[in-house]
Image (tube, helix red, strand yellow):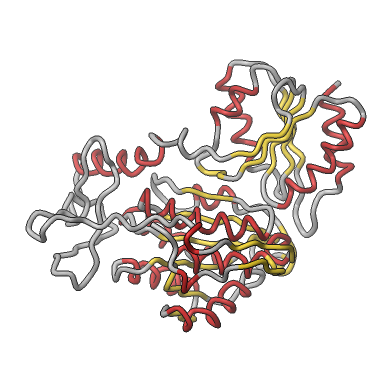
């Protein structure tokens, strides 16, 4: 279906990534946000609070991040598309409700504008150190999807994609921004509503007596949805549950439910690959990056190419599920992977795991950074040149 024109601020704008993310959410159909202010993400909800009365939605500033992360889930079951916005310390507080959203299969978008940590850390400065937390931060086994923009334009574009994926797979989807991209001001082109594809919620056509809250088939692992007030009985719980949504705390139901929650993402891992590759075919060195670091890495790659090094650039747009198959294919010809990131070595572990599975002897070089600023291009260049020797 096409986007609702009321939510689309068509035209060319000179705005920062936070504001662009807000406009992407509105264009995707988001009509409810519960949030708690935290630097450097506050501008997203500030703009949403100003814009949402004009398109018939609601913004609520909650008393804390725990309240915000559960309020959005109630709104989903009231029929709304929702978003939650935070940064590192707030994200840590939301981890229990992330698991609840995964277990109840509540489609929702979670925006994390990353800053230096741990704890209160560097509130106004960048990092990329929440990547493993969004994948593994809540207890138990579950799957999420996470996207990483590297420009305000992508903050708009990928926000729409995040909402579409959350509806398609009925799972939490993260937009993993960082302080630099969030506060970076650039040109953002917003197309007319009839050029924006929006995924509609998977509403059931079954009658109340025939509908099961979590009924699926072997071919389609994503349940259909209903909303409160339509005459259906709704039962939701974070406990292990049966197809009706009722608690069923036994081994057979755990053995049925948890693999399905994982498989609805894992079976579609190839479909969910979203990377940007530049010069990777035949390259001796492949630089793997994401978010703001990808822009710094591009300068280092250009400098290495000027010195005659065959270097390619693999930028992760969808970071989770991790595109291991892409890495394994490139490992067949590359000599080394270089992985710069604004943390002390997180996504590099996924690259190493994929290379190990490839059975090729390829170096994987981490280029860590504790955050607070971005890499100097020369630091990445030095590692590229060393890996190429």
Of residues 277 and 112, the one drawn nearer to the viewer in this rendering: 277
Side of 22 relative to 15 (left or right) = left
- Examine the rendering and report whether any part of residue 10 can be seen: yes
Side of 102 relative to 173 (left or right) = left
Which residue is situated farthest in the right direction here?
307
Side of 92 relative to 198 (left or right) = right
Q: Give the vertical position of 379 relative to 56 (above or below).
A: above
Name the residue located 41 percent from the left edge and 62 percent from the top edge.
Answer: 97
Q: Position of residue 293 (x, y in %)?
A: 74, 48
Of residues 218 and 358, the one drawn nearer to the viewer in this rendering: 218
Number of numbered callouts drawn? 0
Q: Position of residue 281 (x, y in %)?
A: 70, 23
Q: Where does the N terminus fall, quadrant-wise?
A: bottom left
- Which quadrant of the structure image shows residue 265? top left
Q: Give the vertical position of 321 relative to 307 (above or below).
A: below
Q: Give the vertical position of 378 relative to 122 (above or below).
A: above
Q: Where does the C terminus fall, quadrant-wise?
A: top right
Q: Give the vertical position of 18 relative to 289 (above or below).
A: below
- Which quadrant of the structure image shows residue 385? top right
Name the residue located 72 percent from the left edge and 50 percent from the top edge.
Answer: 342
- Examine the rendering and report whether any part of residue 62 can be seen: no
Which residue is situated farthest in the left direction here?
209
Name the residue located 35 percent from the left edge and 52 percent from the top edge.
Answer: 170
Q: Position of residue 279 (x, y in %)?
A: 73, 29
Name the residue located 39 percent from the left edge and 46 percent from the top edge.
Answer: 142
Q: Position of residue 7 (x, y in %)?
A: 49, 71
């Amino acid at each position: 279906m096409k986007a609702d024109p009321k939510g689309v601020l068509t035209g060319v704008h000179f705005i920062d990534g936070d504001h662009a993310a807000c406009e992407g959410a509105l264009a995707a159909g988001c009509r409810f946000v519960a949030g708690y202010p935290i630097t450097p993400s506050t501008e997203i909800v500030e703009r949403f609070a100003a814009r949402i009365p004009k398109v018939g939605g609601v913004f609520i500033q909650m008393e804390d991040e725990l309240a915000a992360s559960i309020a959005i889930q109630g709104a989903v079951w009231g029929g709304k598309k929702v978003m939650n916005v935070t940064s590192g310390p707030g994200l840590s507080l939301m981890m229990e409700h992330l698991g609840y959203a995964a277990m109840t299969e509540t489609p929702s978008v979670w925006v994390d504008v990353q800053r230096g940590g741990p704890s209160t850390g560097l509130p106004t400065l960048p990092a990329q150190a929440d990547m493993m937390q969004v994948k593994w931060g809540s207890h138990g086994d579950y799957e999420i999807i996470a996207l990483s923009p590297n420009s305000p334009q992508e903050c708009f574009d990928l926000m729409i994609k995040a909402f579409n994926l959350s509806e398609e797979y009925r799972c939490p989807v993260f937009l993993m921004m960082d302080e630099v991209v969030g506060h970076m001001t650039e040109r953002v082109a917003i197309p007319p509503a009839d050029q924006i594809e929006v995924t509609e919620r998977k509403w059931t056509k079954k009658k109340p007596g025939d509908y099961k809250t979590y009924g699926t088939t072997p071919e389609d692992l994503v349940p259909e949805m209903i909303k409160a007030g339509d005459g259906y009985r709704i039962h939701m719980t974070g406990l292990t549950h049966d197809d009706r949504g009722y608690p069923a705390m036994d081994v057979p139901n755990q053995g049925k439910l948890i693999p399905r929650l994982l498989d609805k993402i894992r079976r579609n891992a190839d479909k969910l690959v979203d990377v940007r590759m530049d010069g990777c075919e035949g390259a001796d060195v492949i630089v793997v990056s994401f978010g703001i670091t990808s822009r710094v890495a591009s300068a280092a790659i250009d400098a290495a190419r000027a010195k005659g090094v065959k270097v390619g650039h693999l930028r992760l747009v969808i970071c989770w599920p991790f595109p291991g198959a892409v890495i394994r294919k490139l490992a067949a010809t590359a000599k080394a992977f270089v992985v710069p990131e604004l943390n002390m070595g997180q996504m590099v572990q996924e690259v190493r795991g994929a290379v190990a599975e490839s059975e090729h002897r390829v170096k994987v070089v981490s280029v860590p950074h504790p955050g607070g600023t971005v890499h100097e291009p020369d630091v990445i260049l030095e590692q590229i040149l060393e890996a190429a020797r």
